[in-house]
Image (cartoon, helix red, strand yellow):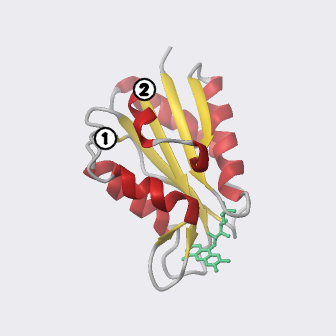
């Protein structure tokens, strides 16, 4: 059975709720999934998983800013080598801001820098939109994982 880790940083619980739905979606597809708040996760453990999902909400306005708990983890990722791993990013934001879900952009950039293959476009959940089908997104991830896209 393939395994996955979902690591998220969330200020008010929105990205945490999305992370929980992603976990349900992956479990439905028989993935062995670990869910961690970034405050409990270490960069080193990522290499134990076939599929890595990193999530953060976006803060700030002038610049793209990660949720505060994610900052340290993100910095530690720099220079880390996860070549050959499959990965994808996600997070919540608000399209009223200049950099809508800018943190997802940052996570995708870093995941590419450290050698992962981005399986799919990151999930960017808008506070203004309550119709987002997170589980459908998770199913698409699994399809792509199986095909080795
Ligand atoms: C002070 C402040 C700054 C924010 N800046 C951004 C931003 O730059 N881009 C964005 O997409 N959302 C921004 N947001 C919206 C949050 O990212 C959004 O509410 C998100 O759902 C919070 O998720 P969380 O509960 O997981 O932290 C901001 C919200 C606040 C209160």
Q: Secondary structure at mark 1?
A: loop
What residue is at 45 percent from the left and 37 percent from the top?
Answer: 52
- 91 versus 46 height, above or below: below
Query: Left of 149 or right of it: where is 65?
Result: right
What residue is at 58 percent from the left and 27 percent from the top?
Answer: 33
Residue 89 locus on image (x, y percent): 47, 50
Residue furthest to the top in view is 1
Residue 42 locus on image (x, y percent): 48, 41
Q: Secondary structure at mark 2?
A: helix
Residue 48 locus on image (x, y percent): 42, 26
Q: Which mark is residue 65?
A: none
Pointer 1 with pointer 2, Cβ within 8 A: no
Q: CA distance from mark 1 to mark 2?
A: 14 Å
Please identify the quarter of the rendering in which residue 35 is found. top right
Q: Which mark is residue 48?
A: 2
Residue furthest to the bottom in view is 62
Return the disc, 1 or 2, that comes first in the chain's sequence.
2
Q: Which residue is mark 1?
A: 116
Rendered-image quarter of ligand 1 = bottom right
Query: Left of 49 or right of it: where is 138?
Result: right
- 9 versus 3 height, above or below: below
Return the residue nearer the eye: 82 or 109: 82
Residue 137 locus on image (x, y percent): 56, 43
Q: Nearer the viewer, mark 1 or mark 2?
A: 2
Query: Is ligand 1 less than 8 Å from the beta carbon at label 2?
Result: no
What residue is at 50 percent from the left and 13 percent from the top?
Answer: 1
Return the residue nearer the eye: 46 or 108: 46
Please identify the quarter of the rendering in which residue 128 is found. bottom right
């Amino acid at each position: 059975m393939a395994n996955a880790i979902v690591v998220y940083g969330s200020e008010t619980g929105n990205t945490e709720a999305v992370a929980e739905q992603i976990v349900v979606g992956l479990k439905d597809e028989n993935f062995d999934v670990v869910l961690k708040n970034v405050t409990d996760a270490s960069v080193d453990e990522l290499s134990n998983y076939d599929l890595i999902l990193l999530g953060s909400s976006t803060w700030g306005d002038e610049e793209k800013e990660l949720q505060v708990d994610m900052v340290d983890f993100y910095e530690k990722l720099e220079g880390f080598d996860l070549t050959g791993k499959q990965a994808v990013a996600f997070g919540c934001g608000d399209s009223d801001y200049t950099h809508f879900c800018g943190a997802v952009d940052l996570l995708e950039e870093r995941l590419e820098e450290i050698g992962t293959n981005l399986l799919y476009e990151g999930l960017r959940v808008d506070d203004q939109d309550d119709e987002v089908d997170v589980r459908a997104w998770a199913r698409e991830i699994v399809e792509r994982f199986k095909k080795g896209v």
